[in-house]
Image (cartoon, helix red, strand yellow):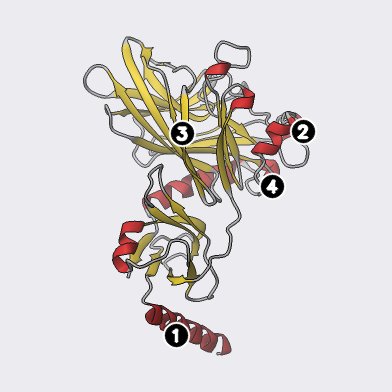
Amino acid sequence: MKKSIKYILAVLFFYSTVSAQQKSTIVITNTANQDRNAAVVSVNWATILKSNSKIDTANFKVINAATQEEVPFQLEHKGQPAIQNLLLQVSVKAKGKTELAIVAGKASPVKAKTYARYIPERKDDFAWENDKVAFRMYGKALEKTSEDAYGIDFWTKSTANLVINDRYKKNDYHKDHGDGLDYYSVGFTLGAGGMAPYINDTVRYSGNYRSSKVLDNGPLRSTFQLTYDEWNAAGIKVNVIKTISIDAGSQLNRIEHLYTFTGSGSLPVAIGLSTRNEASKKLLLDKTGVLGYWEPVHGNDGITGVGAVTLSPLQNTADAPKQALGITTVKNNVPYVYYAGAAWNKAGEITSETAWFDYLKNYQQQLKSPLKVVVK
């Protein structure tokens, strides 16, 4: 009873504060049967301004109605001068809702949980991470060297801290110093969820990326673009721009490919997960759009799981030499979005094949039932 009274008083105080200051109210509803914990939600900034055109971007905070606690947020620009979205990290119970308010006041600092940067000191690497996982892509300086690789590389982590800068500074990241390491092998595959044209049953790799641009850099989401030189994919001239985002708390990246190519019709492409040489592979190849692989143990380094999720069904899947593939098509100059990433058993959260495959299936369900946002 006392808890109920406290809750009612908190809500009444919340609404009296909102009413007095004429600030925006944000209602986030979860229509699914799964709890959403620490999810990053995007709220259109123009919609917020319609609700309250006098918001001071340098002097506001977001408050949870039920708890009166501050909610972590980020102003997302997507590479533009003007604010595009307000990003919020919230938890919403299954079939429940969370009510927030934007009120005047100095917001508490939000600890950075995502990070991305170009690494000129290491042969044009581009690396990015969040509080769960880290990745990198290879640049032109690595092409035609013994270290060259085509796909997405994965760096294991067992800490919520950001590790990229420290690992490059030490230049000893193939050994676990207590927070993870780089032992994942990409080779001439698509690695941890890369994509490339797939023509005549063959992956047609591009060269490594030519240029990079960071669009946003934390604390809750980091987004960047990679551009590539045109290449010949079995007689088709292909160009691509890749836009990759990583959110706090997620094992997977949002990956958008914008292909332009010669000829008419669509371009066959494959999403790939590098595999090893074991006789019996722990694979999930679901044409509804869920791909997963749980690698064999790698000595003391542990076990990596890699995976990819699409919203639309795949045309086919294949356990090809060195990699598992999900095959689909893209249209000329129309973005194609999918999600890909990895997990490490020694991080202590996803420690089995079953847990990893369940994570990927649940991720797809969350994409199909996104949190609904209403601004009042």
* Disc 3, SS: strand
Q: Crowding near pointer 1: few (<14 within 10 Å), some, many (20+)?
A: some
- Kindly identify the residue that appears in the image at 58 percent across and 41 percent down: 129
* Disc 2, SS: helix
Residue at the disc numbered 4: 159
Amino acid type shown at disc 1 = Leu
- Kindly identify the residue that appears in the image at 44 percent across and 85 percent down: 12
Left or right of 144, for residue 159: right
Q: Crowding near pointer 4: few (<14 within 10 Å), some, many (20+)?
A: some
Between discs 3 and 2, the one toward the N terminus: 3
Q: Is residue 19 above or below residue 260?
A: below
Coordinates of residue 234 in the picture (x, y in percent): 35, 10
Residue at the disc numbered 1: 12
* Disc 1, SS: helix
Q: Is residue 319 visible?
A: yes
How many angstroms separate mark 2 from mark 1 (CA)? 55 Å
Amino acid type shown at disc 3 = Lys
